[in-house]
Amino acid sequence: MRALGMTGPAITLERVSLRLGQTAVLREVSLHVAPGSVHALVGPNGAGKSSLVKTLLGQTPHEGAVKIEWPGTAVGTVGYVPQALAFDAGLPLTVDDFMATMTQRKPAFLGFSALRSREIGEALARVGMADKRRRRMGALSGGERQRVLLAQGMVPMPALLVLDEPLAALDEAGVQVFEQLLADFRQAGVTVLWIEHDLQAVARLADSVTGLNRQVLFSGPPSEVLTPEALLDLFSTRPRAPVAPPAAPSPQPVRAEEALA
Ligand SMILES: Nc1ncnc2c1ncn2[C@@H]1O[C@H](COP(=O)(O)OP(=O)(O)OP(=O)(O)O)[C@@H](O)[C@H]1O
């Protein structure tokens, strides 16, 4: 992997709350991502993972503090790989056109610079798509499209990379490509924030993981925090109700294990 000019930032969220319409999507979320680490975000559907990422990227009005601390004075490049993009199968947009559109400001039909063209070629090669640059996006399989999405997140090479379910459509070979990329990112000092539903992949590949269900339930190294009890707690209620103040004596609460039995 090419040496980077800058390694990744540290990320700190302090008591971040987000309300969308009537919904409290994030409640007092605090977490820390070490610079150059691979940090996973896990939680049930609707837990607020994508919303947290949007908040991190400055796209939502929120309460609390979001700090991205770059090494040195310059702000580095942020790459973002979205969950999925829908394409009209008939759209005359090639993989190259898509990469140009996503990675530069000038219109794709004006082409791209030699440097950018080389970077795009390298990124597509790293995800095994170098021979499909002229194929229409609408003609790609779901997994191939996912690989192209990954590639666009690497042009220009970011110091912070945010991945929203990158494994969702990947086959076994694609997963291996992803594992190699993560190893390369780690070696280059890129900070990776990774939303993922595949808990085994998280346990195998992440340095740290946060369990989120509107609020943080756990955060730490996967081997320490991904316990059966913590996962049961994270996935057995969705979304979490606000914590109610203590009330008058009431029947014993049903434990999550019993509720699921
Ligand atoms: N603009 C909005 N107005 C109201 N509610 C919203 C809005 N956008 C998202 N939500 C709600 O916020 C909650 C969190 O959504 P979010 O997409 O962040 O969850 P997620 O953890 O990424 O889920 P998934 O795993 O399904 O992708 C959901 O209940 C969603 O319906």
Image (cartoon, grey):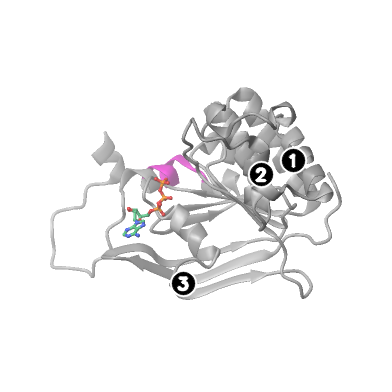
Where does label 2 land, which residue?
Answer: 99
Closer to the N terminus: mark 1 or mark 3? 3
Q: Is mark 2 within 8 Å of ligand 1?
A: no
| Closer-to-camera residue (101/152) | 101
**Residue that appears at 29% across and 65% down:** 21
Which residue extends farthest right? 3
Determine if residue 153 is in view: no
| Closer-to-camera residue (235/161) | 161
Q: Which residues are magenta?
A: 226-232
Query: Disc 1, disc 2: CB below 8 Å?
Result: yes
- Report, in whole angstroms, how far the alpha carbon at label 3 lies from the one at label 2: 36 Å
> Label 2 neighbourhood size at 10 Å, few (<14), some (14-19), many (20+)?
many
Res 174 quadrant in image: top right
Q: Position of residue 147 (x, y in %)?
A: 63, 35
- Report, in whole angstroms, how far the alpha carbon at label 1 lies from the one at label 2: 10 Å
Amino acid found under the numbered disc labelled 2: Met
Q: Position of residue 253 (x, y in %)?
A: 21, 52
Residue 169: say if magenta: no
Where does label 1 land, which residue?
Answer: 123
In front: mark 3 or mark 2? Answer: 2
- Report, in whole angstroms, how far the alpha carbon at label 1 lies from the one at label 3: 37 Å
Which residue extends farthest front? 110
